[in-house]
Image (cartoon, rainbow, N blue to C red):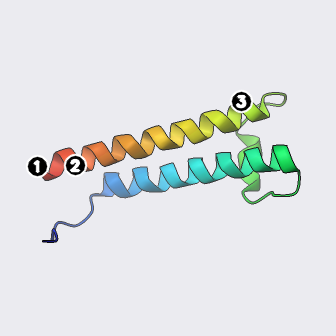
Amino acid sequence: MTSTNPKSPLAAVTGLLSFVLVLGGGSGLLHEWLGWIHFMGFVRFLVPDGYEIFGYVVMVVLGVAVGAGGDSLTRRART
């Protein structure tokens, strides 16, 4: 049985933010390790010089946390 409730705006925003953080952090890590993948170039402005690896790992972890929090909020709203 499917739900007819539309997705809340908060769920959409947290999903988008989670996607951008995980994808940006992952592409930044791949760029640092391999040197040839530079998919989301704007994320280099979000991490300080000299702390690139740590900053990209924090972005991935934060993206996963935001996604889990948004999913938890939408599940709580449904019940």
- Judge left or right: residue 37 versus residue 13: right
The residue tagged 1 is 79
Disc 2 and disc 1 in contact, CB within 8 angstroms? yes
- 2 above or below 66? below
Q: x, y (%) of residue 22?
A: 58, 48
Could you say which quadrant of the image residue 73 lies in? top left
Between the residue at mark 3 and the residue at mark 2, the CA separation in whole angstroms equals 32 Å
Q: Residues within 10 Å of mark 1 (few under 14, many from 20)?
A: few
Q: x, y (%) of residue 49?
A: 83, 31
Q: Residue at point 37% right, 58% down?
A: 12
Q: Residues within 10 Å of mark 2 (few under 14, many from 20)?
A: few
- 36 above or below 75? below
Q: Nearer the viewer, residue 74 or 34?
A: 34
Pick the quarter of the image with the N terminus.
bottom left
Q: Residue furthest right?
A: 35
Q: x, y (%) of residue 20?
A: 57, 53
Q: Amino acid at mark 2?
A: Arg
Could you say which quadrant of the image residue 5 lies in? bottom left
- Judge left or right: residue 40 versus residue 78: right
Disc 3 and disc 2 in contact, CB within 8 angstroms? no
| Secondary structure state at the residue bearing disc 3 | helix
Q: Amino acid at mark 1?
A: Thr
Q: Residues within 10 Å of mark 3 (few under 14, many from 20)?
A: few
The residue tagged 3 is 54
The residue tagged 2 is 75
Q: x, y (%) of residue 42?
A: 73, 51
Mark 3 and mark 2 lie on one chain; the one further toward the N terminus is 3
Between the residue at mark 3 and the residue at mark 1, the CA separation in whole angstroms equals 38 Å
